[in-house]
Amino acid sequence: MSIDTLLLQVGTQTEAPTGTPRRNALGYRAPDPSTAANLGTAFSNVARARADHPAVETKSGTFSYDWMLRAAASVRENIRNRPGYAPGACVAMQLSNSPEYLAAFYGALLADCVVVPLPVSLEEQRRQKILETCQPALLITRLSDLNAQEPQSAAATLHLSKSGNEEIRFPLPRRQDHDLAMLLFTSGSMGAPKGVMLSHRNLLANAGAILRELPVRADDRTLAVLPFCHAFGNSILQTHMLSGATLLLERALTFPSSILDALRELEATSFSAVPEVYGMLLKYGHLGERPLPALRYMTVAGGALRHDLAAEIASRIQPASFHVMYGQSEATARLAALPPDHLHTRRGSIGKAISGVELAVMDEANRELPVGTVGMLCARGANVMLGYWHDKAATADVLSDDGWLRTGDLAHRDEEGYFYLHGRANLLVKIQGYRVHPAEVEALVEADFPQTSAVAIPVARGDEVRFILFLAPRDNRPIDVMKIRAACQRELPAYKQPVQYEVLERFPLTSGYKVDRAALALLVGDSPTSRRDQTDIVTQS
Amino acid sequence: MAADRKKLEADLTEFVRSRGARHAAATPSTDLLESGLLDSLLLMDLIFHIEERYGVRFDSDQVNPSNFRTIEDIVSFVQNQLSMPQGQSD
């Protein structure tokens, strides 16, 4: 398999638009995204209407909608001029949040291709598996996002610095409603990567529904910390670009105080993050102490935020509003939202179905359960995916013939249609908004160390969830924890790395002779923290 | 205390280095912010590690760039906290 690599490079700041962009183009109201023919056309129309308005602001400059459309048009042209180009082909991209990301994303859509955004920190094994599955002819990246080991002799470079005044002309993309627009790889219920197939209609419908729920305006400035290659981050990208608003991309937001400083200094009007980030802002930030006059609202999704923390944030950011939302990649992004004024009356609720979405709690046979009964949360609507890429069996597991998606989340509904979550029906956990299956860690260890069995157990650490890795020998050879830990550190992104390693002689088993994960989870509770220091010890069984 | 500083520095350097390929070359004086090695997940893990192992608690004011710019800065901060009357010195 050979994949061409295209490196994008933004010219120096002087090549960014020099005119003073209008900060407040009052009165602009973007058309409802759900009425557009396809996502590329929707972006192109807004970009032409908002030409001088900043689409993206970074430390190095301001990039107007006009710049962005030109950059996307250059990517489009590059893709279409490649030998073997065919509409509907997959174009992979591995880019951190940047103007280049937007140029690659919309450029590929304008070329009638399917975008496959991959996280920059993706582990190599998984990356190979994904690339083999979707066979892209092209991978778009940039030097600063390239893996150091990556051979790049064959890489071509495209400079995105055209700031000419000539009119940007290209025929609009022809993709339609149900054509595939994007493959979003996530973890399936068994841990293997699954490509969530999102159509133009999925993406446009969900963007439209979110825009009816949130007070997004054309003069909005959102501080974007979520990776755009993630369903939540992607929804921030689409809703803001399709509204003609501005994305603020700051590189260094490591510290809670740097997030708050950025919100104030950049006059951000909104902010969206996963629960872990809010936990950090409350614990180590001074959220609410210094006023954020420009701020209008904040949102949380990508995991469950404890009610008391949500209430605390809501009170600290007043008069700005706090929106608790819920969704998943298989539904493009969002499924439910809790109106801010119901935060206190519907404690712990994920809210009601957003516009165009039906939510129901069902039993194993997909029959709706009565109010108050816990069952599988199911969703139906124009935002529900087409299925998993090249995986009919996995698709059939979650999508019924009549369009209901089984989310994998357990929930109940109250009399007024508000939903409440009760954990997962499978082993998937959310870490920093990423869906991770314990098998992703276990399979890596067992592949490298076949004489060892590994079981990863999620454990709460403060407001975060991380894994503890239990190890047991398959034969009588000792387990070298140091080597296993080194392999995990080498091959897994940080959020998947176990924070503790424990060696057992054998795993507890259930009556069905499966590893008893619940019993292991109890061991975690018993394990004194001082044992953390013993993890380097090579244990002889 | 001088010997402790070396131990503390070695421990935190190892903690940062073991983070992945990009982190393997970190030294006590590497600028963790300029180099982009310190992201929010590593920051939270470092805080957890220091709180658990050394019994040092961070106030919200103390989680800032000047205390976390280099491993040396973190070491100085932790030592400072440990030598204060209310700090535990184990």
Image: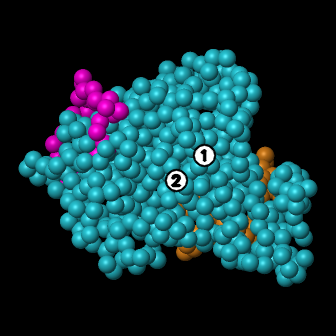
Chain colours: A cyan, B orange
Dividing the picture into quadrants, the one containing residue A157 is: bottom left
Q: Identify the mark at residue A398; answer none if there is no mark.
A: 1
Q: Identify the mark at residue A450; answer none if there is no mark.
A: none
**Image quadrant for the C terminus of chain A?**
bottom right
At x 66%, y 70%, the residue is A444
**Looking at this rendering, what residue extends furthest in the left direction?**
A166
Dividing the picture into quadrants, the one containing residue A532 is: bottom right
At x 35%, y 28%, the residue is A217
Res A398 visible:
yes
Pointer 2 local density, CA inside 10 Å: few below 14, some 14–19, many at least 20:
many
Label 1: state its secondary structure.
helix
- Please, what is the three-letter code of the amino acid marked with disc 2? Tyr
Q: Is residue A59 left or right of residue A518?
A: left
Looking at the picture, do discs 2 and 1 lie on one chain?
Answer: yes
Q: The numbered mark 2 sits on a residue in which chain?
A: A
Q: Position of residue A161 (x, y in %)?
A: 20, 58
In magenta, the rendered stretch is: A15-40
- The answer to whether marks 2 and 1 mark residues whose Cβ atoms lie closer than 8 Å is yes
Q: The numbered mark 1 sits on a residue in which chain?
A: A
Camera-side residue: A130 or B49? A130
**Image quadrant for the N terminus of chain A?**
bottom left
Q: In the image, is residue A193 part of the stretch drawn in magenta?
A: no
Q: Position of residue B13 (x, y in %)?
A: 64, 69
**Residue wearing tag 2:** A388
Q: Is residue B68 left or right of residue A527?
A: left
At x 60%, y 46%, the residue is A398
- Please, what is the three-letter code of the amino acid marked with disc 1? Val
Q: Position of residue A512 (x, y in %)?
A: 88, 57
**Looking at this rendering, what residue extends furthest in the front direction?**
A401
Q: Position of residue A500 (x, y in %)?
A: 76, 62
Camera-side residue: A256 or A190? A190
